[in-house]
Structure formats: C-alpha cells, structure tokens
Image (cartoon, rainbow, N blue to C red):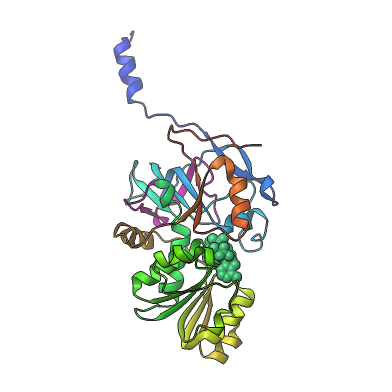
Amino acid sequence: MTRTLESITKHIGALPQMKSQTMKAIRIHNYGGPEVLQYEAAPCPKPGKGEVLIRVHAAGVNPIDWKVRAGYMKDFIAHSFPIILGWDVSGVIEEVGPNVSRFKKGDEVYSLPDHTRNGAYGEYIVVRESEVALKPNALHHVRAAAMPLATLTAWQALFDTAQLQPRQRVLIHGAAGGVGHFAVQLAKWKGAHVIGTASARNHEMLYELGADELIDYTVLKFESIVRDVDVVLDTIGGDTQERSWQVLKKGGALVSLVQQPSENKAKEHGVRGIRLGARANGQELVEIAKIVDAGKLAPVIDRILPLSEARRAHELSQSGHTHGKIVLRVKNGNGTTERMAR
Ligand SMILES: NC(=O)c1ccc[n+]([C@@H]2O[C@H](COP(=O)([O-])OP(=O)(O)OC[C@H]3O[C@@H](n4cnc5c(N)ncnc54)[C@H](OP(=O)(O)O)[C@@H]3O)[C@@H](O)[C@H]2O)c1
C-alpha cells in the first residue's frame, strides 16, 4: 500500500523531536590549572528514575569548581574522569524520568545538584527531582543560577545549624563573597543584627543589602571592635577563625564552611564549633525562591561570562576577591552554545 505524502507528514509530525546524543560541555580529563578545562563534545545524559534532564541556561561558578579542578577535593569527593564541573544551575526541564511527580517538561527550575555527579558546565544536566525547585519568578536564568549553592549554604549555616533568631547578633566573615552577601540578606530577613567583614570598596553594596556594621578587615582587627555575638559565620578559616572565638557570647555558635573548628577551643569558650558541608535541598530552594519573589533577597553579580570563558571565570574566582557571584551563560539568546576560546 502506498502512503500519501499527507499521511507520511502526519506520521513524522507525531514523532517526538530527536535530541542529539551528544552535547557541548566543558570537561576536565585530569587535575590542574584553568588550562585543563576543555570545551568538547560529551554524551548527553539521560534521566533515570526520579531524575530530570535540564537544558542548562546558566551555571553559577563557586570556589568548589576550581578546588575540584585543581585536585584539592580528590580525597573527599569520588569523581571519575572526565568530570563536568559546576554545581549551580538554572534552566528548563527537557525530559522527566520515571516516577517524577513534581515537575514536567518546560518547567523553569534552579538547583544545587549533587556535587559527586557531573555538573552544569554543559548544555544538559541530569538532577534528582529532590534537588530541584521552580526558579524564582523575579529572576531570569542567569541571575537564578547564582543562587542555589551559596544561598543554601548560608541558609543551612545560619538557620539549620546555628539556629539564628531575630535580634541576635551575627558576624559574617567574607560578607562580600558569594556566600557572605546572601548570608547578610538572609540574616537581615530573619531580623538579626548583622556585622560583616569586607574590604572598604564593598561596604556601600553591603549596607544596601542590609548590613548594620562593617569592618574593613584590611585595616582593622575585627576582635578589637566586635563583642558578644551569638553566631559567627566563618567563610575564611585560619587566623580569622582563630580570632573569632573571643567575640562569641557563651552559648553561641561558630559555623565554618572551610575548616573544622577546634573542640577544645569551643569548650574553653562555652560555645559550639561546627564545620558545615552544604547539602542539596529542593524544599529549601522553594523557601528561598519565596523570599526572592518577596523582594527580600537578590544576587549581586560580579561578572557574567559565556561558557566559552570558563577558564577566565576560574581565574577570577580563584583570586578570592570577587564580590557576589560569577555566572556562566550557557544558552545564548539564539539557543546556541559558544565555542571556547583557545
Ligand atoms: N562547606 C561548604 O559547603 C561550602 C559551601 C560554599 C562555600 N564554601 C567555601 O567557603 C568559602 C567562601 O565561598 P564564597 O563562594 O563566598 O567565596 P568567594 O565568593 O570567592 O569569596 C570572595 C570574598 O572573600 C572576601 N575575603 C577574602 N579574604 C577575606 C578576609 N580575610 N576577611 C574577610 N573577607 C575576605 C573577599 O572580599 P574582598 O574582596 O573585600 O577582600 C571576597 O569578596 C570558599 O572557600 C568556599 O569553597 C564551602
């Protein structure tokens, strides 16, 4: 039987759109400097049970990216090469795997994906449904991609771990950084008195975000001014952590993102000392999106770079003196992904 052109066209029209088996991504095949970031074709991942496939629009850059790239995390995170870096994503759901109930194709979402799996420096990423939330309506993808890892870290440090309460006093070290500038806003939203350390060039921005007191750590020892704080958020470690014990009230908490606080020092000062490892959490991202949409929380963006400039993004992040966040734009306005500069 011959089929009419019309019936063939109808049949083709009914076929699902075929997605390429490969995608463009930035991967590393060995540890090293920014030069090990390679822009190349990689297999396009497929969502399994309870997972979604996200078309990445933008990927946030965090210090963990260059720490993994340089091999500093190899004793803590079991990755196998090649690795796609980048554990901050905003994009659109392209496909849902079996047993996914909260999301559908076309949903605009953001996520902190599990950092033991491949990240978001590519056109697609597979993420567990439990790690995803609808992105804040108030933010386009490039700004939403700046949020998940750093806001969840600040949230889990201040609220889940330190149990920060309204009217308590909090000292945030590295207040101008990716985590710090969100911590300032979240602590303020909670009703706390917010003290931050940052170099003077970032003070205006931080006062606008709600900080009550700022100390230029390059010219003043914070412990010469600050007293009786309930919570210290330590994003710096070393000498900064060591000098923080004396500013805490008895019963207070020192939460560090970078270094295990000494148990002996904590006992000696009658406080808690906790090292936090932030975890993926879709439910907390739902709460964070509400605060963003209520106008109480927003990212400060230091730089937006195309995915092709991932090496530059790493150099900037590794300098340790960016303010707010760096974001890689993965999907251009015309739907393409750029080639990486050699
Ligand atoms: N454990 C976890 O789960 C977790 C999660 C997130 C981040 N982290 C870690 O936490 C650290 C901070 O992350 P981030 O994303 O906020 O980094 P970031 O954005 O790179 O932080 C940069 C900021 O740090 C400030 N800074 C540098 N030295 C300082 C000092 N001695 N005192 C006060 N501020 C100082 C800089 O301010 P100036 O330019 O004014 O100097 C800059 O604004 C990183 O080591 C990261 O790997 C850990």
Q: Quadrant of residue 2?
A: top left
Residue extending furthest toward the top: 2
Membership of 127 in magenta stretch: yes
Q: Is residue 29 visible?
A: no
Position of residue 195 in the picture relative to residue 103 (left or right): right
Which image quadrant: the C terminus?
A: top right
Residue at 43%, 32% in the rendered image: 334
Residue 84 location, x and y as percent? 58, 47
Ligand 1 shows up in the quarter that is bottom right
Position of residue 131 in the picture relative to residue 27 (left or right): left
Position of residue 163 in the picture relative to residue 259 (left or right): left
Q: How many marks?
A: 0
Membership of 286 in magenta stretch: no
Residue 268 location, x and y as percent? 57, 91
In depth, the one of 38 and 220 nearer the eye is 220
Magenta part of the chain: 114-140
Residue at 61%, 39% in the rendered image: 39
Q: Is residue 57 visible?
A: yes
In depth, the one of 99 and 262 nearer the eye is 262
In depth, the one of 188 and 106 nearer the eye is 188
Q: Is residue 61 above or below residue 259?
A: above
Q: Is residue 264 above or below residue 91?
A: below
Residue 200 location, x and y as percent? 53, 67
Q: Is residue 52 above or below residue 243?
A: above
Residue 20 location, x and y as percent? 49, 31
Which image quadrant: the N terminus?
A: top left
